[in-house]
Image (cartoon, helix red, strand yellow):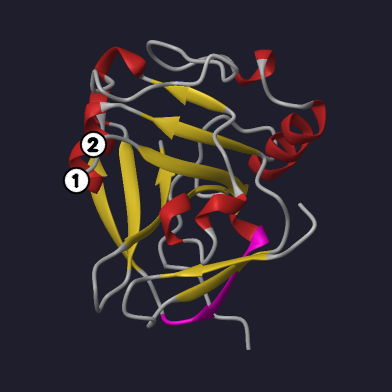
Amino acid sequence: MTVTLNGGCACGEVRYRLTSAPMFVHCCHCLNCQRHTGSAFVINLLIEAARVELLSGAPLPVTMPLGGGTPNRIFRCPGCQVALWSEYGGRSQVWFVRGGTLDEPSAVAPDVHIYTRSKLPWVQVPESVPAFDAYYDPKTLWPASSLERRKAALGGATNRPPTPDPPRRSD
């Protein structure tokens, strides 16, 4: 990524900046993402929490259950309630930033389509982009540098408890 990606909510209360390129970009077609977004899919930029700089506002975490009871914390603007990012499975070190909240959402494209078994029939997946009925093994698709970043962010742990507080602003 040659430019910094900035984004925020619809009302402008919460603004953020990604300080590096995402590790990987998902287009998720699962039923949970469809329900949570009110859309056919969600674009998620996977990035280390430490590489998201909060410029203004204080997103509120809302905990939603996922399949199997694993937690999904969705961070929303307290004013307009737009979902800005999520933490899945209690992994607070890696965030799934919503691509639609970027100032320039066309700056990113999906690296993979997941949970296509619940994809709406009118959504077309480009043949050039890998697609999976469910999830996949990141080791099979992610660049080595992204796998290293993920490993460093998780500190070798596969699952850690969620952070108790929303991110702090950088002033």
Pointer 2 and pointer 1: residues touching (CB < 8 Å)? yes
The part of the chain drawn in magenta is 51-57
Residue 61, by quadrant, is bottom left
Position above or below: 22 against 124: below
Q: Position of residue 156 (x, y in %)?
A: 69, 32
Above/below status of 129 relative to 108: above
Q: Circle 1 sits in a helix, a strand or a loop, which is it? A: loop
Q: Which mark is residue 38?
A: 1
Residue 105 appears at what percent x and percent y? 51, 55
97 and 5: which is toward the camera: 5
Residue 70 vertical placement versus 64 (above, below): above
Q: Is 46 on the left-hand or right-hand side of 70?
A: right
Tell me the residue that label 2 is attached to. 34
Q: Is residue 122 magenta?
A: no
**Is residue 141 left or right of 73 when viewed as pictured?**
right
Q: Name the amino acid type tagged 2.
A: Gln
Q: CA distance from mark 2 to mark 1?
A: 6 Å
Give residue 107's mark: none
- Give whichever of 64, 77 is nearer the camera: 77
Residue 53 among those drawn in magenta: yes
